[in-house]
């Protein structure tokens, strides 16, 4: 029985790992119908994330994809970016030409609201790969869309793996903790890919060479991004390779059995400067707080990279 592709909106702050996630989604039309790609400030400012998203679509030869620019600052705080990880452009590594395909006129938040109102209820999945500012702004502006969302599958947070931007917080949540709190309290079915799982999906020499040996432009670019991206994590963690964070979200939509996790209560710290942006995950069920998220902890890394390499070869 053939299933119809799942309708998704990818909300993103490219970023090399966002790029690989977007390419995996674009290479999977039988599984995913991308209604639009909405961009947000995060790894680098919005002026670059909206440009990078179009560069990635052009690399995949999918120039009909609708790309929107969204929020350029968090709900309440100054923007924190991550050029130290992703480089000045956000896609450092290979040299990339400016995009030719157009940016959509409509604001990303208006696109999210309009799409959720137009599509049948519970048929659109939101896939945030960066700070949650666009999603939270849409929920604030149009609360009626909240119970129309099918599911939110996001990359963000950390528990056993602790933080990557502060000792307590993961970057996407830390940049806009108030937005994250709105999403985590929204009641929408949540699947969370925290550092606990993405740090088990590490690149290594063989996996990067497998990308390069695909033999197409996409494989070459992904290998060069991975080469650039891994230097930060290798220095920081001493680990071989870098975690491909964001592609875990898309891989879950295509092959959920690659991942294991628990339905638990996850709350966001928004008050304490010391632990701002921490995802307080009740993994051991020590409270009676209701579960609001499927919080992932394990991944079949071999299967993940096999899926990724196979699908990227299609582009
Ligand atoms: O902490 C990792 C996350 O922050 C990833 O989504 C990466 O792209 C950055 O946005
Ligand atoms: Ca990202």
Image: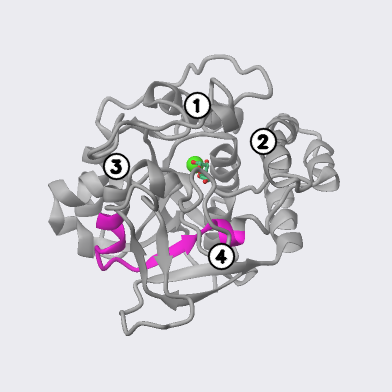
Q: Earlier in the sequence, mark 4 or mark 2?
A: 4
Q: Is residue 76 visible?
A: yes
Q: Which residues are magenta?
A: 181-197
- Callout in the foreground (1, 2): 2
Determine which of the numbered discs, if any, sits on residue 134 in the image.
Answer: 3
Q: Which residue is mark 2?
A: 232
Q: Nearer the viewer, residue 91 or 67?
A: 91
From mark 1 to mark 2, how far is it between C-alphas?
20 Å
The answer to which of marks 4 and 1 sits earlier in the sequence is: 1
Q: Look at mark 1 in the image and give the residue it sits on.
A: 52
Q: Which mark is residue 219?
A: none
Circle 4: element type: loop
Describe the element under mark 2 as helix, strand or loop: helix
Q: Earlier in the sequence, mark 1 or mark 2?
A: 1
In terms of sequence position, does the residue under pointer 3 or pointer 4 come before the other? 3
Q: Is residue 30 visible?
A: no
Q: Which residue is mark 4?
A: 160
Q: Are marks 4 and 1 in contact (CB under 8 Å)?
A: no
| Closer to us: 122 or 264 | 264
**Which of pointers 2 and 3 indicates the residue nearer the eye?**
2
């Amino acid at each position: 029985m053939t299933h119809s592709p799942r309708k998704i909106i990818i909300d993103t702050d490219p970023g090399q790992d966002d790029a690989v996630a977007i390419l995996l989604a674009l290479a999977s039309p039988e599984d995913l119908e991308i209604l639009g790609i909405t961009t947000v400030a995060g790894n680098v400012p919005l002026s670059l994330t909206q440009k990078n998203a179009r560069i990635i679509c052009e690399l995949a030869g999918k120039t009909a994809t609708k790309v929107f620019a969204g929020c350029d600052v968090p709900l309440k705080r100054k923007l924190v970016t991550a050029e130290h990880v992703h480089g000045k452009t956000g896609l450092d590594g290979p040299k990339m030409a400016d995009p030719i395909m157009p940016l959509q006129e409509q604001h990303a938040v208006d696109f999210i609201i309009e799409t959720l109102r137009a599509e049948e209820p519970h048929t659109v999945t939101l896939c945030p790969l960066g700070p949650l500012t666009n999603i939270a702004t849409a929920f604030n502006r149009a609360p009626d869309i909240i119970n129309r969302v099918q599911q939110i599958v996001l990359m963000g947070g950390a528990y056993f793996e602790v933080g990557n931007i502060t000792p307590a917080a993961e970057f996407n949540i830390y940049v806009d903790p108030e937005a994250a709190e709105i999403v985590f309290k929204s009641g929408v079915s949540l699947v969370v890919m925290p550092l606990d799982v993405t740090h088990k999906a590490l690149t290594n020499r063989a996996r990067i060479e497998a990308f390069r040996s695909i033999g197409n432009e996409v494989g070459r670019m992904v290998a060069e991004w991975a080469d650039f991206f891994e230097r930060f994590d290798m220095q920081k963690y001493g680990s071989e390779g870098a975690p491909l964070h964001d592609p875990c979200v898309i891989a879950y939509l295509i092959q959920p059995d690659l991942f294991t996790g628990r339905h638990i209560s996850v709350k966001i710290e928004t008050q304490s400067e010391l632990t701002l942006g921490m995802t307080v995950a009740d993994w051991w069920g020590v409270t009676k707080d209701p579960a609001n998220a499927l919080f992932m902890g394990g991944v079949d890394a071999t299967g993940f990279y096999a899926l990724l390499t196979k699908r990227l070869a299609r582009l």
